[in-house]
Image (tube, rainbow, N blue to C red):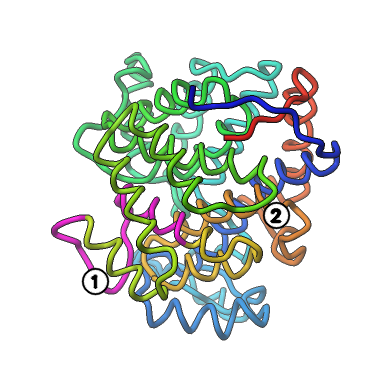
Amino acid sequence: MIFCYIILMYSEDFKRKRFIGSILGLCVGDSLGFIIKDYDKKIAKDYVINCVNNLQVLQYGRGYRSDSKVTGPVHIREQNKCSWFYKFGQYTDHSRHLREILLCVYENNGTFNFENYTKKITQMYKYPRRRNGNGSIIKNAADKLNRGISYKFSGIENTLSNTSAVNSGIFGLLFNNDLIDITSTYSMITHMSSKCAAGSVCIASFVLMASVNQTIQPENFLNKAAECVSKIDTEFAQNILILKKVINLPADHAFVMIKSIKNGWEDNNKINSDVVVSVLWSIYCFLKHPNNFMDCINEALLVGGNVHSTAAMAGSMSGAFLGIDAIPKQFLERLNDDSKWNGVDLYNLSSKVYDICYNKNDDMIMI
């Protein structure tokens, strides 16, 4: 048995804070990364040091020119020069789809109905594509679903992105008994790939472990995650174990080792959306900074590139371990999706889902 049941003497308030912390932690990481998404390490470092650390980032958003080329970080005073401007706190499809998962679970009284969820996805993509993260992979899957193709066959072949992995931590929080089956099936909606399913299970298992353990034990966590993932993709499982040699290295050296796992890396100056590398980098950031949410997020951002994904995954793990109180209120308060579904709304939805699911079974699980 991979999962061993034990009852932990955690207060109800403590469990709730960890549950909500994982969800909001993902959203905060996503929103912070969105501003510099696709930029290189130099800009990412300047952003973290000069904007995030001193809260100057609160005055920034992400802008687009009329020709749809990215202008990236834009000061609030300069927003009128952009044809599109998203103020600070705007999150992307990662948080948006996590929100839809929560709504699905809430509407179905604590269960995750795949048919219901896929209907929500198809509705979202009937509208013009947004510039803040509605990626082509989910759009392609939504197109198939709209044509009546089953969610079991809507995934894209030969695409090894982290799209499904980023949001999968919620399945570790909610469905620990069926974590592998539900998470891998969820990944199939967008990806027909064992690697993508393995990445999703890896994140779900790490979020579960973070949410129920009192201390972080890197080697034990890596062993258990690899054991889960080996059910789906043995090569990915072996890649997880490589992190044992990496977690004590400085970030620059660790990043080089993690990148070396994949041949033909696209850009040596920033991370891309490859599911193996981005998942492993996010785990490194969490294990490197288990006791400080912002240090974990900043590490995920500093590599540049697909940082809204890495920061979202790192945030879901860190928030699950440290709880909602560890996340700066300034960032939580400004979360939004085109000025809708703000931080308070997401908090309230998460709390309702927690009440439905955890009242069914108060036992916690440690793995």
Residue indicated by mark 2 = 322
Most foreground residue, 111 or 228: 228
* 330 in the magenta segment: no
Most foreground residue, 48 or 71: 48
Residue in the picture at 34% in, 17% down: 152
> Are there few (<14), some (14-19), or many (20+) residues within 10 Å of tag 1?
some
Residue indicated by mark 1 = 268
Q: Position of residue 320 (x, y in %)?
A: 65, 47
Residue in the picture at 61% in, 55% down: 318
Residue in the picture at 48% in, 29% down: 121
Q: Are marks 2 and 1 in contact (CB under 8 Å)?
A: no
Q: Position of residue 252 (x, y in %)?
A: 36, 76
Q: Earlier in the sequence, mark 2 or mark 1?
A: 1
Q: Which mark is residue 149?
A: none
- The secondary element bearing badge 2 is classed as helix
Left or right: 134, with 215 as reference point: left
In the image, residue 9 above or below residue 297: above
- The secondary element bearing badge 1 is classed as loop
> Are there few (<14), some (14-19), or many (20+) residues within 10 Å of tag 2?
many
| Res. 208 image quadrant | top right
In the image, residue 43 above or below residue 109: below
Instruction: Tell me the kind of residue under disc 2.
Output: Leu
In the image, residue 254 above or below residue 333: below
Q: Position of residue 79 (x, y in %)?
A: 56, 74
Instruction: Tell me the kind of residue under disc 1.
Output: Asn
Q: Which residues are magenta?
A: 262-284
